[in-house]
Image: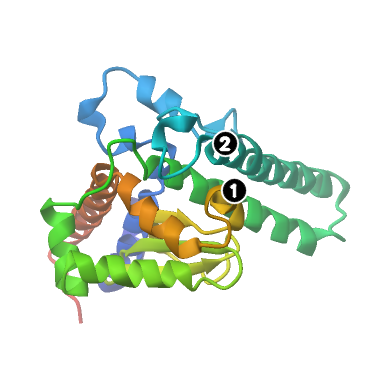
Amino acid sequence: MANESMLPIGQRRDVLQTIGGLTGLAVVGSTATVGADDNDGDEGSQVYDATENGRYALPELPYEYGALEPHIDERIMELHHSEHHQGYVDGANDALDAFEEMRSDSNFEDIKAVKRDFSFNLSGHVNHTIFWQNMSPDGGGAPDGEFRSALEDQFGSFEAFQNEFSTAAENVESNGWAMLFYEPIADLLVIGQVESQNGLAHQGAIPILTLDVWEHAYYLQYENERASYIEEWWNVVDWTDVCQRYEFLTQTRANEVSEDGADGNETDN
C-alpha cells in the first residue's frame, strides 16, 4: 500500500509487529475468529458477539450458568454475567453517547470524567468477554502444542507458570484481574496484574487468559478465600481457547513481519 512505503523498513516492521498484536483483538468477538475452520456459517460469531450496530453488546455465554459447577456456582455466574458485565456494557455505551453530545454542543467540560468512565467500562467489557470464553465445563488439565512449548521456554514448566499466575492473582491489590498477555513487540508471554479493570494494563499487549478476582466473581461461594477460588478455577480453564488465541496472534505477527521483509530488497541499517 502507498502509505506503508512512507516509513523506513525497520520502523515499519516495528509498527507492524505492534499492529499484529492489536489485530488479535478480533478474538474478543468470538473464538470462531480463531478456529474458523471449526464453524459452519456464522452461528458462532452470533453467539459470542460483543458488539451490535456500532455499540457494545453483552455476549451470550458458550455454556449454561450452572455448567461450571461445582467450581463456580450458578448464581455467581448469573449475577456476574447478567448484572456486572451488563453494567460495563451499559457504561461504555453511555460514555459513547456522552461523547456525541459533547461534540454536538462543543462543550467538553466533563471530558476527564467521561474518558475515565469509558476506559473503565470498555476494559471491563473486553476483560469479561475473554474471561467467559476462557472457561468451559470440559476445561482443566494442561495445554499442549506450541503454546505449551512457549510456556515451558519462558517460565521453565507449565507448573511454574501456574504458580506464578496464581500468586499474581492472589496478590492483586483490592479488586482486579490476573492476565496472561501476548506481547507482540518482543514475541513474549507476560503475566500481569490489572488493578480494577484497566490500571497497570500493558500497552499493545493482548490478554489471552484472564482471571477475574473482583469479589463479585467468587464471594458468594468462597467468601474471602480468594486462593481457594483460584485453585478451583484452574479446573475450568479452556486451554483449547487459550491455545487458539496464542496461535492466532503469533501467526498474525509472523505473517505481517514476513510480508514486511518481503516488500522490496531494502535492508535495515
Q: Secondary structure at mark 1?
A: helix
Instruction: State how far apart marks 2 and 1 are (Cα).
Output: 8 Å
Q: Nearer the viewer, residue 132 or 96?
A: 132
Looking at the figure, which quarter contains the C terminus? bottom left
Q: Secondary structure at mark 2?
A: helix
State which quadrant residue 168 falls in: bottom left
**Hey, which residue is sitting farthest bottom in the picture?**
269
Q: Nearer the viewer, residue 73 or 192?
A: 73
Percent of width and height locating residue 209: 36, 54
Name the residue at 63% across, 57% down.
119
**Mark sitting on residue 262:** none
Side (left or right) of 260 relative to 102: left
| Amino acid found under the numbered disc labelled 2 | Arg
Side (left or right) of 83 relative to 131: right
**Mark sitting on residue 220:** 1
Q: Is residue 253 above or below residue 65?
A: below
Q: Is residue 37 above or below residue 225?
A: above
Name the residue at 34% across, 45% down.
236
State which quadrant residue 34 falls in: top left
Q: Nearer the viewer, residue 41 or 215?
A: 215
Side (left or right) of 120 relative to 100: left
Color theme of the render: rainbow
Q: Residues within 10 Å of mark 1 (few under 14, many from 20)?
A: few
Pointer 2 and pointer 1: residues touching (CB < 8 Å)? yes
State which quadrant residue 153 falls in: bottom left
Percent of width and height locating residue 118: 67, 53
Q: Residue under circle 2?
A: 75
| Amino acid found under the numbered disc labelled 1 | Leu
Task: Choose the circle earlier in sequence order: 2 or 1.
Answer: 2
The answer to whether residue 263 is seen in the rendering is no
Q: Nearer the viewer, residue 32 or 265?
A: 32
Percent of width and height locating residue 51: 54, 34
